[in-house]
Structures are given as C-alpha cells and as structure tokens.
Amino acid sequence: MTELKHQHYMQVALNAALKGVGRTAPNPPVGAVIVKSDQIVGVGFHPQAGQPHAEIFALEQAGDNARGADIYVTLEPCSHYGKTPPCADALIAAGIKAVYIGVVDPNPQVAGRGVKKLQNAGVVVQTGVLESECLQLIKPFRKHIVTGLPFTIYKAAVTLDGNTATKSGDSRWVSGEASLLTVHQLRDRVDAIMVGIGTVLNDDPLLNTRLPDGDGRDPMRIVVDSQLRIDPRCRLLTQESTAQSMIATISTDTKKISILRDMGVDVVVLPSVSGRVSLPALWTYLGQQNIQRLLLEGGATLATEALHHELIDQLMVFIAPKLLGGSSLFRLFSGTGCDKMGDAIQLENLDYQQVGEDLLITGDIASCLPD
C-alpha cells in the first residue's frame, strides 16, 4: 500500500477522533480505522473516559473482517489495564495483521509498550503516519500528562486598531456572528472556561454553550475572584446548567462561602500572592481535577498574569474590521509591555482563517509547551 493511502486512512481516523475532543479527559481523543482489501470495515473513536477505546469500537464494527486486516490508530494502542482492558491485547486476539500508528503515547510510563507487545506477537507496526497532525490532536493531553497542567487557550476579539472594547467598556459585540458561533463551538470542546471577577461584574455572562442545533455541552465555569466579590444572584450562578461552577479565591469569608456552596458552587480557597489568587496554584489544582483543555476568556488583567507565569499555550484572536480610535484602556494584555521588539513573545504554528468578516489568528506560545 502506498504512503498516500496510509495517510488517507489515518486522516479518516483523525476525523473520527475529533468527535471526542473535549469529552475524553483525562484520556486523549483517539480515532481508529480498520481496512481490509482496501475497504474500510470498521471505524471507532473514544467518546469519554471509562468507555471503550477507539480500537474496540472499530473491532466491534469490523467483526470477523478484522482478521488479517490493517488498523490505523491516531495514538499508540494501550498495553495496560486501566478502566478498560489493553487494546493491544484485543488487536492481537482479533487477528489484526498490521497496525499503523500516528504517534507513540507521550506518557513516559507507557510509551512504546503497546508497540513492543504488538511486535512480540508478530504484528507489523509502523509509527509516524501523519505524526504532526496526530500530535496536534493530542496537544492538550500531552501538556497535561507531561506537566500536570491544563492546555490553556486565550481567546479574545479585537478591532483593527487593537481594542477589545470602546472607551466606555462596551464590548458587545466586537466580532461578527460567524465568530460568535465559532466561539460556542470552541466552548463545546473544552473542559472549562475561566474568567476574572471583573468580567462577571461588568458583563454578567452566562459562559454557556449555545449552538443552533442545541447539542452543545456546557463546560465547567471558573471565576477567579480573590476577594469573593461575586453576587450570588448573577446569571452564571442562577441560570440552569449541567456544568459545575467554581470560584477560586483567597477569601476566608465563611458566611459567603457557605451561601455559595449551598447553591452548589465549588468554592476553592487557594494560596495568595500579592493579595490575589496564585495562578500557578490554581492551574495545578485544575490539572489535578483532570482539566485538560482550558479556555481563558477573561480580561487583560487575568490574561497578563497568566502570560507572566507562562500558563497560556495558545492564542486565538478574532480581528474585526472595525476602528474605534482614541486611546483605549481595553487591550489584549495590560502591564508595562516590552521596551524592544526583540523582547516580544513570538507565536509559532500560526494559522489564519477568515470567519465571516473577521480574521482569526491562532498561534502557540512555544515557551509554555513541553518539548
């Protein structure tokens, strides 16, 4: 089979894996495709933690056709018992002839063991098929498994002259309808959304997912509120949602904490740094809660502090074809800034996409990603 065909079938596996993005933590999203006589006989993806892995769903669909067939899987099949039996054993038992793998598991405790088990059983194994694309798919999982921290995306919208709001603070809406839809699609695929208390007090946001088909899932909503200024009557806490709301604070106001907890809010008291919540401590806590994909939607103060601590992995900036003029205080980031252009933070893996009338620029902050 030609390399182009290998890439084609791996792309089918990647497309299947995308169905699980944002729903599999602490596991990664994985897709698998079984091919026999140049025909796809089974496709599977991992829907969520605790359920069968992608390979098992593909094997069930293929049935007896799996014997003597090839399988394409975006991530190395597991070789250990977790919540489900090892996939490598299932592939061997089903008589799979060859396994084509996108990327070896980045978990140092299991990396390469699935490959070795398959090879010891006489199965042909090839790794690195569409490796960069498969690495892109599991980037949040890799960040979490290597560092223990969530992969953090800072999303913002700005005008052409760099403003996130008018001089009065009005930001509804900087970007167009197509961009707003993209944001809600993004919310549907993350584990949690985070904002600062200023955003809650000024905008009273819902922070939910609103998609046209109504199938969107609300992620956990996190508010960084050092002094516990949040109003228990705000929409975030009173509108019905299946998602958990969490407040990170340094406050010891036991009465208000009790009121919030009685409402079902998870109030987490964290260490203080200069009178504010320690963001490194918060990110560590979120990693311990198996938050892999974190969407930061707060204002410049929270974003700047997260950037200072190298906690932001990726920027998604919607640039709208609008001009506000003036000298606005509302920018992507605050602080004193750089003196020299050579000190600027450089983005990598840049992607440019037109979304309606807006331009979406996505890029990684290399210093935050594991090697």
Image: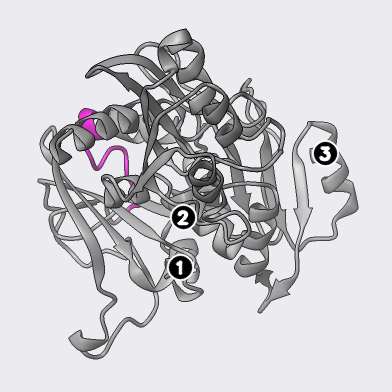
- Amino acid on which disc 2 is placed: Thr
Asked whether the beta carbons under mark 3 and mark 2 sit within 8 Å of each other, the answer is no
Give the magenta part as a residue range: 168-180
**Left or right, residue 188 beside residue 175:** right
Q: Which residue is mark 2?
A: 152
Marking on residue 261: 3
Asked whether the beta carbons under mark 2 and mark 1 sit within 8 Å of each other, the answer is no
Looking at marks 2 and 1 on the same chain, the residue that comes earlier in the sequence is marked by: 2
- Amino acid on which disc 3 is placed: Arg
Secondary structure beneath label 2:
strand
Q: Residue 118 at x, y = what percent?
A: 51, 41
Q: Residue at x 66, y 62 (%)?
A: 284
Q: Nearer the viewer, mark 2 or mark 1?
A: 1
- Amino acid on which disc 1 is placed: Pro
Asked whether the beta carbons under mark 1 and mark 3 sit within 8 Å of each other, the answer is no
Marking on residue 370: 1
Marking on residue 288: none
Q: Is residue 180 above or below residue 95?
A: below
The answer for how far apart the CA atoms under marks 1 and 3 are is: 36 Å
Q: Residue at x 54, y 30 (%)?
A: 92
How many C-alpha atoms fall within 10 Å of the one at disc 3: few (<14), some, or many (≥20)? some
Viewer-closest of 154 and 321: 154
Secondary structure beneath label 3:
helix
The answer for how far apart the CA atoms under marks 3 and 2 are is: 27 Å
The answer for how far apart the CA atoms under marks 2 and 1 are is: 13 Å
Question: Residue 109 magenta-drawn?
Answer: no
Q: Is residue 69 above or below residue 326?
A: above
Viewer-closest of 159 and 218: 218
Looking at marks 3 and 2 on the same chain, the residue that comes earlier in the sequence is marked by: 2
The quarter of the picture where the N terminus appears is top left
Viewer-closest of 6 and 200: 6
